[in-house]
Amino acid sequence: MTLPDQEARRSAPLTRSALRLNQVTRSYGHGNGTVHALRSVSVSLPAGSFTSVMGPSGSGKSTLLRCAAGLDRPTSGQVFLGDTDISGMRERKLTILRRERIGFVFQSFNLVPSLTARENILLPFRLAGRRPDRDWMRDVIARTGLTDRLRHRPAELSGGQQQRVAVARALVTRPEVIFADEPTGALDLSSGQEVLKLLREVVDTTGQTLVMVTHDPQAASYADQVLFLADGTVVDAMDRPSAQRVSERMSRLGS
Protein backbone atom coordinates (compact mmCIF):
# COMPACT_ATOMS: atom_id res chain seq x y z
CA MET A 1 0.00 0.00 0.00
CA THR A 2 1.38 3.43 -0.93
CA LEU A 3 0.75 6.16 1.63
CA PRO A 4 0.00 9.76 0.59
CA ASP A 5 3.14 11.63 -0.47
CA GLN A 6 5.19 8.43 -0.44
CA GLU A 7 5.94 8.47 -4.16
CA ALA A 8 6.64 12.20 -4.07
CA ARG A 9 9.13 11.79 -1.27
CA ARG A 10 10.79 8.81 -2.92
CA SER A 11 11.38 10.86 -6.07
CA ALA A 12 12.44 14.05 -4.24
CA PRO A 13 16.14 14.94 -4.20
CA LEU A 14 17.85 13.99 -0.93
CA THR A 15 21.33 15.40 -0.49
CA ARG A 16 22.36 16.12 3.11
CA SER A 17 23.70 13.03 4.85
CA ALA A 18 22.00 12.18 8.12
CA LEU A 19 24.31 9.21 8.65
CA ARG A 20 27.62 8.27 7.08
CA LEU A 21 29.93 5.29 7.58
CA ASN A 22 33.45 5.66 6.22
CA GLN A 23 35.46 2.44 5.81
CA VAL A 24 33.95 0.92 8.96
CA THR A 25 35.38 -2.43 10.04
CA ARG A 26 34.29 -4.33 13.14
CA SER A 27 36.26 -7.37 14.22
CA TYR A 28 35.95 -9.66 17.22
CA GLY A 29 38.60 -11.96 18.69
CA HIS A 30 42.30 -12.24 17.96
CA GLY A 31 44.66 -14.15 15.72
CA ASN A 32 43.22 -17.17 13.95
CA GLY A 33 39.98 -16.73 15.89
CA THR A 34 39.28 -13.25 14.53
CA VAL A 35 35.78 -12.74 13.12
CA HIS A 36 35.23 -9.81 10.77
CA ALA A 37 31.60 -8.78 11.24
CA LEU A 38 32.01 -5.69 9.03
CA ARG A 39 34.67 -5.17 6.36
CA SER A 40 35.42 -1.59 5.25
CA VAL A 41 31.76 -0.58 4.90
CA SER A 42 31.13 2.89 3.44
CA VAL A 43 27.56 4.17 3.08
CA SER A 44 25.90 7.57 3.15
CA LEU A 45 22.20 7.84 4.00
CA PRO A 46 20.36 11.05 3.05
CA ALA A 47 18.37 12.99 5.60
CA GLY A 48 14.67 12.21 5.37
CA SER A 49 15.20 8.75 3.87
CA PHE A 50 14.01 5.27 4.87
CA THR A 51 16.65 2.56 4.41
CA SER A 52 16.22 -1.17 4.98
CA VAL A 53 19.24 -3.37 5.67
CA MET A 54 19.02 -7.02 4.66
CA GLY A 55 21.26 -10.04 4.32
CA PRO A 56 21.64 -13.67 5.32
CA SER A 57 22.15 -14.64 8.94
CA GLY A 58 25.63 -13.58 10.03
CA SER A 59 26.03 -11.05 7.22
CA GLY A 60 26.66 -8.13 9.59
CA LYS A 61 23.22 -6.44 9.62
CA SER A 62 22.93 -6.02 13.37
CA THR A 63 26.59 -5.07 13.72
CA LEU A 64 26.15 -2.34 11.12
CA LEU A 65 23.15 -1.00 13.01
CA ARG A 66 24.95 -1.10 16.35
CA CYS A 67 28.01 0.69 15.00
CA ALA A 68 25.89 3.27 13.16
CA ALA A 69 23.85 3.95 16.31
CA GLY A 70 26.85 4.26 18.60
CA LEU A 71 25.99 1.10 20.53
CA ASP A 72 29.22 -0.57 19.41
CA ARG A 73 32.55 0.95 18.40
CA PRO A 74 34.16 0.20 15.04
CA THR A 75 37.54 -1.48 15.10
CA SER A 76 38.51 1.04 12.43
CA GLY A 77 36.79 3.65 10.31
CA GLN A 78 34.45 6.51 11.17
CA VAL A 79 30.73 6.96 11.82
CA PHE A 80 29.18 10.40 11.34
CA LEU A 81 25.79 11.47 12.67
CA GLY A 82 25.26 14.57 10.58
CA ASP A 83 28.61 16.32 10.85
CA THR A 84 29.50 14.72 14.20
CA ASP A 85 32.09 11.95 14.28
CA ILE A 86 30.76 9.58 16.96
CA SER A 87 33.21 6.71 16.43
CA GLY A 88 35.81 7.98 18.91
CA MET A 89 33.47 9.78 21.30
CA ARG A 90 33.78 9.14 25.03
CA GLU A 91 31.06 6.95 26.49
CA ARG A 92 29.36 9.59 28.63
CA LYS A 93 29.16 12.06 25.77
CA LEU A 94 28.01 9.29 23.44
CA THR A 95 25.24 8.30 25.87
CA ILE A 96 23.95 11.88 25.91
CA LEU A 97 24.13 12.06 22.10
CA ARG A 98 22.14 8.84 21.71
CA ARG A 99 19.53 10.13 24.13
CA GLU A 100 19.12 13.46 22.33
CA ARG A 101 19.73 12.70 18.65
CA ILE A 102 18.94 9.00 18.10
CA GLY A 103 15.78 6.94 18.53
CA PHE A 104 15.53 3.16 18.88
CA VAL A 105 12.80 0.63 18.11
CA PHE A 106 13.58 -3.00 18.96
CA GLN A 107 11.92 -6.32 18.13
CA SER A 108 11.28 -7.02 21.82
CA PHE A 109 9.75 -3.55 22.43
CA ASN A 110 12.02 -2.90 25.49
CA LEU A 111 9.22 -1.32 27.51
CA VAL A 112 9.37 -1.04 31.31
CA PRO A 113 6.59 -3.38 32.58
CA SER A 114 5.78 -1.32 35.68
CA LEU A 115 5.27 1.93 33.73
CA THR A 116 2.17 2.99 31.83
CA ALA A 117 2.30 3.64 28.09
CA ARG A 118 2.54 7.38 28.76
CA GLU A 119 5.36 6.90 31.26
CA ASN A 120 7.25 4.65 28.84
CA ILE A 121 6.90 7.24 26.07
CA LEU A 122 8.25 9.99 28.35
CA LEU A 123 11.06 7.87 29.81
CA PRO A 124 13.83 9.53 27.71
CA PHE A 125 12.90 12.91 29.20
CA ARG A 126 12.81 11.49 32.71
CA LEU A 127 16.30 10.05 32.25
CA ALA A 128 17.60 13.31 30.79
CA GLY A 129 15.90 15.52 33.38
CA ARG A 130 14.16 17.52 30.65
CA ARG A 131 10.60 18.56 29.92
CA PRO A 132 8.92 17.36 26.71
CA ASP A 133 7.44 19.61 24.05
CA ARG A 134 3.76 19.11 24.95
CA ASP A 135 2.42 19.95 21.49
CA TRP A 136 4.82 17.54 19.80
CA MET A 137 4.09 14.86 22.38
CA ARG A 138 0.33 15.13 21.72
CA ASP A 139 1.01 14.94 17.98
CA VAL A 140 3.18 11.81 18.40
CA ILE A 141 0.58 10.13 20.61
CA ALA A 142 -2.20 10.91 18.13
CA ARG A 143 -0.04 9.81 15.19
CA THR A 144 0.66 6.45 16.84
CA GLY A 145 -3.01 5.95 17.79
CA LEU A 146 -2.34 5.65 21.52
CA THR A 147 -4.60 8.37 22.93
CA ASP A 148 -6.92 5.84 24.59
CA ARG A 149 -4.12 3.55 25.81
CA LEU A 150 -1.88 5.92 27.76
CA ARG A 151 -2.83 4.57 31.20
CA HIS A 152 -2.34 0.94 30.22
CA ARG A 153 0.77 -0.98 31.19
CA PRO A 154 2.56 -3.14 28.58
CA ALA A 155 0.92 -6.37 29.78
CA GLU A 156 -2.47 -4.79 29.05
CA LEU A 157 -1.56 -3.95 25.45
CA SER A 158 -1.39 -6.08 22.31
CA GLY A 159 1.97 -6.66 20.63
CA GLY A 160 1.17 -4.08 17.96
CA GLN A 161 0.18 -1.52 20.59
CA GLN A 162 3.38 -2.16 22.55
CA GLN A 163 5.43 -1.59 19.42
CA ARG A 164 3.56 1.65 18.76
CA VAL A 165 4.48 2.77 22.28
CA ALA A 166 8.10 1.99 21.42
CA VAL A 167 7.80 4.01 18.18
CA ALA A 168 6.25 6.92 20.08
CA ARG A 169 9.10 6.79 22.61
CA ALA A 170 11.59 6.89 19.76
CA LEU A 171 9.85 9.86 18.12
CA VAL A 172 9.07 12.05 21.08
CA THR A 173 12.60 13.47 21.45
CA ARG A 174 12.64 14.45 17.74
CA PRO A 175 15.75 12.36 16.92
CA GLU A 176 17.70 12.91 13.72
CA VAL A 177 17.89 9.18 13.01
CA ILE A 178 15.66 6.33 14.16
CA PHE A 179 17.11 2.80 14.19
CA ALA A 180 14.64 -0.08 14.04
CA ASP A 181 15.94 -3.62 14.61
CA GLU A 182 13.43 -6.19 13.26
CA PRO A 183 10.51 -4.02 14.48
CA THR A 184 7.87 -6.43 13.12
CA GLY A 185 9.64 -9.68 14.03
CA ALA A 186 7.49 -10.35 17.10
CA LEU A 187 4.19 -9.24 15.54
CA ASP A 188 1.47 -10.94 13.55
CA LEU A 189 0.99 -9.93 9.92
CA SER A 190 -1.73 -7.34 10.55
CA SER A 191 0.06 -5.66 13.48
CA GLY A 192 3.33 -5.70 11.55
CA GLN A 193 1.77 -3.90 8.60
CA GLU A 194 0.31 -1.27 10.93
CA VAL A 195 3.74 -0.58 12.40
CA LEU A 196 5.37 -0.44 8.94
CA LYS A 197 2.75 2.01 7.68
CA LEU A 198 3.39 4.13 10.76
CA LEU A 199 7.15 4.13 10.20
CA ARG A 200 6.66 5.04 6.53
CA GLU A 201 4.32 7.87 7.52
CA VAL A 202 6.84 9.16 10.06
CA VAL A 203 9.50 9.54 7.38
CA ASP A 204 7.09 11.08 4.88
CA THR A 205 5.60 13.65 7.23
CA THR A 206 8.40 14.57 9.66
CA GLY A 207 11.48 14.30 7.46
CA GLN A 208 13.23 12.12 10.03
CA THR A 209 15.65 9.45 8.86
CA LEU A 210 14.96 5.77 9.47
CA VAL A 211 17.28 2.76 9.26
CA MET A 212 15.60 -0.62 9.64
CA VAL A 213 17.18 -4.06 9.84
CA THR A 214 14.77 -6.73 8.65
CA HIS A 215 14.67 -10.24 7.21
CA ASP A 216 11.23 -9.69 5.64
CA PRO A 217 11.07 -8.62 1.96
CA GLN A 218 7.57 -7.23 2.50
CA ALA A 219 8.82 -5.02 5.33
CA ALA A 220 11.80 -3.92 3.23
CA SER A 221 9.47 -2.81 0.44
CA TYR A 222 8.27 0.10 2.59
CA ALA A 223 11.73 1.69 2.36
CA ASP A 224 13.20 4.10 -0.18
CA GLN A 225 16.20 1.83 -0.63
CA VAL A 226 17.53 -1.52 0.52
CA LEU A 227 21.16 -2.27 1.33
CA PHE A 228 22.17 -5.92 0.98
CA LEU A 229 24.98 -7.30 3.11
CA ALA A 230 26.98 -10.50 2.78
CA ASP A 231 30.08 -11.50 4.74
CA GLY A 232 30.27 -8.07 6.39
CA THR A 233 30.23 -6.13 3.11
CA VAL A 234 27.55 -4.14 1.29
CA VAL A 235 27.20 -6.12 -1.94
CA ASP A 236 24.21 -4.39 -3.53
CA ALA A 237 21.64 -1.63 -3.16
CA MET A 238 18.12 -1.32 -4.53
CA ASP A 239 16.03 1.83 -4.96
CA ARG A 240 12.23 1.76 -4.99
CA PRO A 241 12.15 -1.85 -3.77
CA SER A 242 9.25 -4.24 -4.20
CA ALA A 243 8.78 -7.34 -2.07
CA GLN A 244 9.26 -9.57 -5.11
CA ARG A 245 12.50 -7.91 -6.25
CA VAL A 246 13.89 -7.97 -2.72
CA SER A 247 12.97 -11.64 -2.31
CA GLU A 248 14.64 -12.53 -5.61
CA ARG A 249 17.81 -10.66 -4.62
CA MET A 250 17.90 -12.36 -1.24
CA SER A 251 17.51 -15.75 -2.92
CA ARG A 252 20.60 -15.07 -5.01
CA LEU A 253 22.54 -14.04 -1.88
CA GLY A 254 21.63 -17.31 -0.23
CA SER A 255 22.56 -19.50 -3.19
Image (cartoon, rainbow, N blue to C red):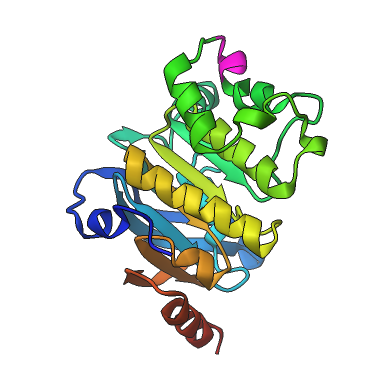
Q: Is residue 196 left or right of residue 34?
A: left
Residue at 21% in and 50% down: 14
Q: Pick the quarter of the image with the C terminus.
A: bottom right
Give the percent coordinates (x, y) of residue 130. Answer: 52, 10
Q: Is residue 133 visible?
A: no
Q: Is residue 254 visible?
A: yes
In the image, is residue 148 above or below residue 130? Answer: below
Number of marks in picture = 0
Give the percent coordinates (x, y) of residue 171. Answer: 48, 33
Q: Is residue 73 left or right of residue 135?
A: right
Residue at 41% in and 54% down: 24
Residue at 60% in and 41% down: 164
Residue at 27% in and 60% down: 7
- Quarter of the view holding residue 162: top right
Which residues make up the magenta segment?
A: 125-129
51 inside magenta stretch: no
Q: Is residue 47 left or right of residue 73?
A: left
Give the percent coordinates (x, y) of residue 91. Answer: 54, 27
In the image, is residue 181 above or below residue 1? Answer: above
Give the percent coordinates (x, y) of residue 252. Answer: 48, 87
Which residue is most to the front?
148
Q: Main secondary structure of the magenta part?
A: helix
Q: Nearer the viewer, residue 26 or 178?
A: 178
In the image, is residue 47 above or below residue 30? Answer: above
